[in-house]
Image (tube, rainbow, N blue to C red):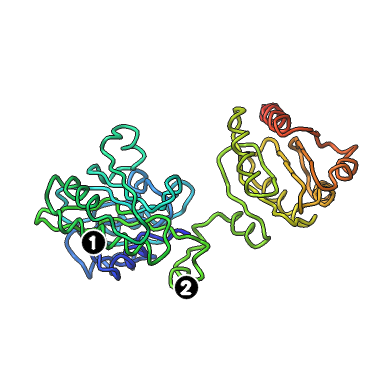
Amino acid sequence: MNIHEHQAKDLFRDAGLPVPEGKVAFTVDEALAAYDHFGGVVAVKAQVHVGGRGKAGGVKIAKNADEVKAAAESIIGLDIKGHVVERLYIEQGSDIAKEAYLAVILDRSEKSVGFIASAEGGMDIEEVAESNPDAILRFGCDTKVFPEAEARKAAEVLFGGEGVEATLKVMHQLFDLFLEKDCTQAEINPLVLTGSGDVIVLDGKMNFDDNALMRHPDVLELRDMNEEDENEILAGEKGLAFISLDGDIGCMVNGAGLAMATLDMIHMHGGEPANFLDVGGSSNPDKVVEAFKLILSNPKVSAVLINIFGGITRCDDIAKGILTAFDQMDITVPMVVRLTGTNAEEGKKMLEGSSLIPASTFGEAVTKAIELGKGSAA
């Protein structure tokens, strides 16, 4: 689960991190009222769950009320990568001397908590990694113990030897907050050294482990459903695991492991998956119909790959759901189906005479879906 910058900063502030004062505004009038409180120079910042706000015109510096009004009017309603701005954060201006990047992450590849730090703050860390990988410091740690020695070395680098103790304190506080709130990511970009030598947190991003939210009702209250994918919300309500992706091959698979393998196989054969969708281990025909609705709601889908390995899931139940979906929906894209396992032969017989394209192996199913998708798109 993600939260807005202003919400992350409230949690930062409660944890003792040095955060500038700011106020949330949902209207231009509220933005002006916030400016009346601060005066001077302020930042007017779009609040959306996506990066690249500054490049999209979602962050503006204002020096008076007229500039705040103009900034608020231009940002509210702005579409940033598919996210429409509904709220602003009006933040007191800061005297920025140097910027750095700092994050604590759940590093699944190393099976540990890890730090990422860079003296090149204020930029997308992905861009830094590509253009200057040596500028990124990485180190892992025990999930219970703050890595004092490694953190101090990083703190000495981030601002060229300035603000070391203050930076080290921020790193420790961020680490503790990460553990306390069951985060998967706690990011500060930029962490700033001011002209007077203070270290402050100028931006904040936090992601949380969905499976741990029952321990954090205060965090769950911060959830903004307007910022989340409607299909993913609907899938959760229907008992489906669904994640939208950027490709055109719709996927319906049973089991998370097989679903991930299916995405990998599509990539290996030169295709791009449109979604991750796990119909679960005890699917019924109604769930299959709902899965089709989710997949086909994406206009980019040019073909659908149905990849079922029947263990607990019965292939004839999947076949019933497929036929029901064909009765209820106008399905025009090609569909490739691979059924194997429990009641596979029964399921295949049920689908005989339909417009589905059968495949006997995993690889055949993937290649057929990609080829047919290209033909459908053409």
Q: Residue at x 32, y 47 (%)?
A: 54
Q: Residues within 10 Å of mark 1 (few under 14, many from 20)?
A: some
Residue 291: x %, y % from top left? 71, 51
Please state which amino acid type lies under the numbered disc 1.
Ala
Q: Nearer the viewer, residue 4 or 216?
A: 216
Q: Nearer the viewer, residue 168 or 50?
A: 168
In this view, 132 is above or below 325: above
In this rendering, would 176 be left or right of 63? right
Residue 101: x %, y % from top left? 27, 48
In this rendering, would 71 be left or right of 231? left
Residue 188: x %, y % from top left? 30, 54
- Looking at marks 2 and 1 on the same chain, the residue that comes earlier in the sequence is marked by 1
Q: Which residue in the structure is indicated by mark 2?
A: 217
Q: Kindly report the distance in space between the C-alpha atoms of the residues bearing marks 2 and 1.
A: 38 Å
Please state which amino acid type lies under the numbered disc 2.
Pro
Answer whether labels 2 and 1 touch (C-beta < 8 Å).
no
Say what secondary structure mark 1 lies in. helix
Q: Which residue in the structure is indicated by mark 1?
A: 65
In this view, 300 is above or below 51: above
The quadrant of the image that shows the C terminus is: top right
Label ID, residue 2: none
In this rendering, would 376 be left or right of 91? right
